[in-house]
Image: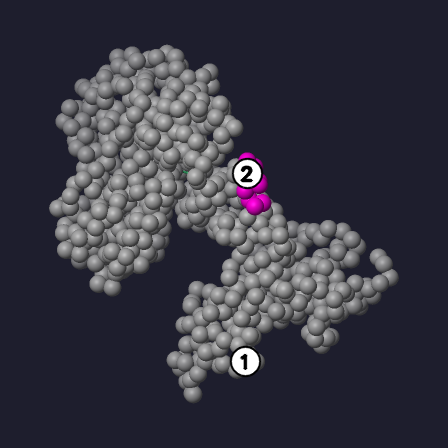
């Protein structure tokens, strides 16, 4: 093992920033990160051992104990649950003969849940050793169980199990364009860098990752910083449950993404770029590397790009199962080989980003839009949309509708139009923007997709009347409690308490005071958390409480208080061990 | 303030009596306090059960066994205002460190396989309260009206809280009393 670790460290130039990459390689070989690997690595990378242990513990895809030759994770996204995930999970458990969350006695296979894997249009979905499994059904599970039991290498599994479709249903401005092979770069260089930046400003392009900051300003600020080195980062962490449009852009428009990054690099004066790809999308890695290589061969990347004297290259970094790494400063920490804990902002990445240097972080879609604007000019884009939200937005549509998939709409399109297009009937409501966004009821379908109305990173989950709002809230509260990075108390403790309080009410142990406590807790989490995750973690509860107070009320008992757990059951172990069953060995749930 | 004295009951559940000791640190202020307060069930009085018209119940410690549940319920039933006093009452505190270990392992270690155990057996006298699977904070078992943070809360915290209540004010703890670093 010693030699292997040495070799990996060497291949990565002993750079501590490459820690995640190194850990991925180690885990691929040993199926976990052994203690002595950490020991050797600490020495080679000149890092404290505790630093590496901390990183391993932080990311949910790294394990310190073997999780088996086959690690199977099933997506716990609400969309997968709606497609029957729970049943399939029990079936899996039974067929594989392993309990959820554990490794089978023979050490061959483990089964567990994971946060949304970005396959909401083709779920129930999961991952085996990180590779995406789609369209899970009982027959497909039988197939998987057979492969596992026979120890068939993944490469020999039926490739249909890993089939990932684009499902582009409604293309518009951007999706109708062909992937760019240098056209945006030549346009930029011919027009002039400042002139192209002016076009991007004219286009009104705002960030597509959620926050909606004006892209041209970001680039301008980065450009104006006094520095010798600058960086371009593409945020492909796409962890918001219900979003999958970046996956499709990377699969079929990767050239445009890289071209957008290259244009940005030319404009701000960066020579190095990174694509931070979420671990769940490792199936795209080889293809993306090949695209990069082809671009190097065509001199669209590398040194002296298109003989114009500017150098730029892009490195792909793979995440390891942490939603928080989509937050730009956590992403930068992760790129630096650390745990993804959000930094204090300001300073913003444009002034102090990767390795403290000015850095542009943009979403995948933002780069695709920017590249096409560089070709067609700002007016081409600004022609569409509303006065405050120019251009189009690519939506990932999932949940209860006929045609799940990718839809591109001019900003200003109403929810009603979208629902009609995707064949959604009998709709109860729509979760716009994922768990951190808002749940709108069927009274609000005239509202528009736009920064000034319903701002969204692209997640659009439809619920019909057979669904229960409380199930949705329950799922989302568990998501946030799981994904909280743990850095600040209001979020670390708050999201766990919120999950517990929601569980209490959903399970029917709530009474009037519990709703008051729930609301107070929401305010604490929202107002005192360090970053966007905590600040939005209470949104599912707040937006549903506001719209459907009666649903919560109906769950409450007409007593002043009841414990949220089964009191009598909590005596069970003691009863069994003391071999008692007398009256004093029991407790009533509520005092008579 | 009315002439009728306010009835205060206190108890230690899964706690260390440190909170009660801190209460006694009120020292000479206790003399002022008993002008307005009459102690009901409390380790200070040896009264065994709460009278049914207690005003304030001060509870130290979390809930670790069935007896704690019964006592806590007695307090809830008989006290108008119930107060969780100290880290153990609020979060489970030190005793809740066992929550990371299964109760089965705890009992086995203590009574069956631990070093130096003679005549190993799990105590099973019906007089003994059974342990809950975990140590719970008070507010997960009954409704709690106020929380006094600290391990233990200082005498000044008790003083500020009680004088506010006695004066009919909504109790408020100034920042200096509840910041610990
Ligand atoms: C918890 C959290 C998760 C985020 N996840 C993503 C993500 O997956 N993809 C993304 O582009 N932006 C994400 N963001 C927003 C980024 O911090 C950042 O604003 C964005 O990448 C900037 O790019 P843009 O201006 O092109 O939108 C997230 C923010 C937070 C607070
Ligand atoms: S709000 Fe949550 S995710 Fe953000 S820093 Fe705090 S603990 Fe981490
Ligand atoms: S809070 Fe501290 S002083 Fe009070 S009972 Fe618990 S351990 Fe003892």
Q: Which chain is mark 2 on? A: A
Q: Quadrant of residue B7?
A: bottom right
Q: How is the image coloured?
A: one colour
Q: Is residue A314 left or right of residue A156?
A: right
Q: Quadrant of residue B153?
A: bottom right
x and y percent of residue B139 in the render? 59, 58
Q: Is residue A70 left or right of residue A477?
A: left
Q: Position of residue B123 (x, y in %)?
A: 49, 81
The residue furthest right is: B3
Whether disc 2's CB lies below 8 Å from ligand 1 is answered no
Q: Which residue is mark 1?
A: B126
x%, y% of residue A45? 26, 50
Position of A503 relative to B67 (above/below): above
Label 1 Cα neighbours within 10 Å, binned few <14 / some 14-19 / many ≥20 = some
Q: Specify start and end residues of the magenta stretch as a single range.
A: A545-554
Pick the residue in front: A477 or B97.
Answer: A477
Q: Which residue is mark 2?
A: A548
Under tag 1, what secondary structure? loop
At a point 15% along the width and 46% down the height, the residue shown is A157
Which chain does the numbered disc 1 sit on?
B
Residue sitting at 33 percent across and 30 percent down? A402
Q: Nearer the viewer, residue A490 or B45?
A: B45
Q: Which mark is residue A363?
A: none
Residue A24 visible in image: no
Magenta highlight: main SS:
helix
Compared with A94, B44 (above or below) is: below
Viewer-closest of A65 and B78: B78
Residue B46 vs A180, above or below: the answer is below
Q: Is residue B68 left or right of residue A331?
A: right
Residue appearing at x 27%, y 53% in the figure: A92
Disc 1 to disc 2, how far (Cα)? 48 Å
Query: Which residue is most to the bottom?
Result: B119
């Amino acid at each position: 093992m010693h030699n292997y670790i040495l070799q990996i460290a060497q291949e990565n130039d002993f750079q501590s920033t490459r820690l995640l990459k190194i850990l991925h390689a180690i885990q691929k070989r040993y199926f976990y990160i052994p203690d002595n690997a950490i020991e050797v690595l600490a020495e080679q990378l000149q890092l404290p051992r505790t630093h590496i242990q901390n990183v391993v513990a932080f990311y949910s895809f790294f394990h310190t104990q073997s999780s088996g030759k086959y690690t199977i994770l099933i997506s716990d996204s609400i969309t997968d649950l709606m497609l029957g995930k729970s049943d399939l999970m029990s079936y899996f458990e039974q067929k594989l003969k392993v309990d959820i969350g554990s490794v089978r006695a023979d050490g061959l296979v483990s089964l567990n849940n994971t946060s949304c894997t970005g396959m909401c249009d083709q779920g129930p979905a999961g991952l085996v050793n990180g590779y995406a499994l789609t369209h899970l059904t009982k027959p497909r599970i039988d197939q998987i169980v057979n492969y596992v039991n026979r120890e068939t290498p993944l490469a020999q599994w039926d490739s249909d199990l890993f089939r990932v479709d684009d499902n582009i249903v409604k293309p518009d401005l951007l999706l109708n364009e062909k992937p760019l092979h240098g056209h945006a770069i030549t346009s930029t260089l011919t027009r002039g860098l400042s002139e192209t930046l002016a076009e991007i400003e004219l286009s009104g392009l705002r960030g597509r990752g959620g926050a909606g900051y004006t892209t041209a300003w970001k680039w301008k600020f980065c450009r104006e910083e006094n520095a010798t080195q600058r960086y371009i980062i593409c945020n492909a962490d796409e962890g918001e449950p219900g979003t999958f449009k970046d996956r499709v852009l990377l699969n079929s428009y990767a050239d445009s993404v890289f071209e957008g990054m290259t244009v940005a690099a030319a404009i701000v004066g960066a020579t190095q770029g990174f694509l931070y790809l979420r671990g769940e999308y490792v199936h795209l890695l080889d293809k993306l590397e090949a695209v990069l290589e082809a671009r190097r061969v065509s001199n669209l990347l590398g040194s002296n790009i298109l003989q114009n004297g500017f150098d730029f290259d892009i490195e792909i970094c793979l995440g390891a199962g942490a939603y928080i790494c989509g937050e730009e400063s956590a992403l930068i920490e992760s790129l630096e080989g650390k745990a993804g804990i959000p930094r204090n902002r300001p300073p913003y990445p444009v002034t102090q980003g990767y390795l403290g240097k000015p850095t542009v972080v943009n979403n995948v879609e933002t780069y695709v839009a920017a590249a096409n604007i560089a070709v067609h000019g700002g007016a081409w884009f600004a022609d569409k949309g509303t006065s405050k939200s120019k251009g189009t937005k690519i939506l990932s549509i999932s949940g209860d509708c006929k045609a799940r998939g990718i839809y591109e709409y001019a900003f200003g399109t109403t929810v009603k139009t979208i629902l009609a297009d995707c064949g959604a009937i009998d709709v109860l409501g729509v979760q716009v923007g994922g768990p951190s966004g808002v749940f709108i009821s069927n009274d609000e379908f005239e509202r528009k997709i736009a920064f000034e109305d319903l701002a969204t990173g692209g997640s659009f989950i439809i619920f019909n009347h057979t669904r229960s709002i409380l199930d949705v809230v329950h799922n989302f509260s568990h998501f946030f409690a799981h994904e909280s990075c743990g850095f600040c108390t209001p979020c670390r403790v708050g999201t766990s308490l919120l999950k517990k309080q929601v569980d209490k009410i959903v399970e029917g142990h709530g009474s009037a005071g519990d709703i008051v406590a729930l609301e107070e807790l929401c305010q604490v989490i929202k107002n005192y958390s360090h970053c966007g995750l905590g600040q939005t973690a209470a949104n599912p509860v707040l937006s549903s409480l506001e719209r459907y107070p009666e649903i919560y009320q109906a769950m409450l008992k007409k007593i002043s208080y009841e414990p949220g757990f089964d009191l009598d059951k909590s005596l069970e172990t003691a009863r069994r061990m003391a071999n008692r069953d007398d009256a004093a060995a029991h407790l009533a749930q509520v005092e008579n | 303030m009315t002439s009728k004295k306010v009835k205060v009951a206190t108890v230690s559940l899964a706690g260390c009596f440190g909170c009660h000791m801190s209460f006694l640190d009120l020292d000479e202020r206790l003399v002022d306090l008993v002008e307005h307060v009459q102690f009901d069930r409390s380790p200070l009085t040896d009264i065994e059960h709460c009278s049914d018209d207690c005003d304030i119940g001060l509870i130290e410690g979390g809930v670790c066994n069935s007896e704690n549940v019964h006592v806590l319920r007695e307090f809830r039933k008989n006290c108008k205002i119930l107060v969780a006093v100290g880290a153990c009452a609020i979060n489970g505190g030190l005793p809740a460190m066992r929550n990371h270990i299964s109760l089965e392992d705890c009992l086995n270690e203590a009574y069956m396989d631990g070093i130096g155990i003679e005549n190993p057996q799990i105590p099973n006298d019906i007089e003994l309260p059974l342990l809950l699977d975990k140590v719970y904070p008070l507010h997960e078992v009954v409704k709690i009206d106020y929380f006094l943070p600290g391990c233990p809360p200082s005498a000044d915290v008790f003083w500020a809280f009680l004088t506010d209540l006695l004066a009919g004010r909504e109790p408020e703890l100034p920042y200096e009393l509840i910041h610990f670093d």
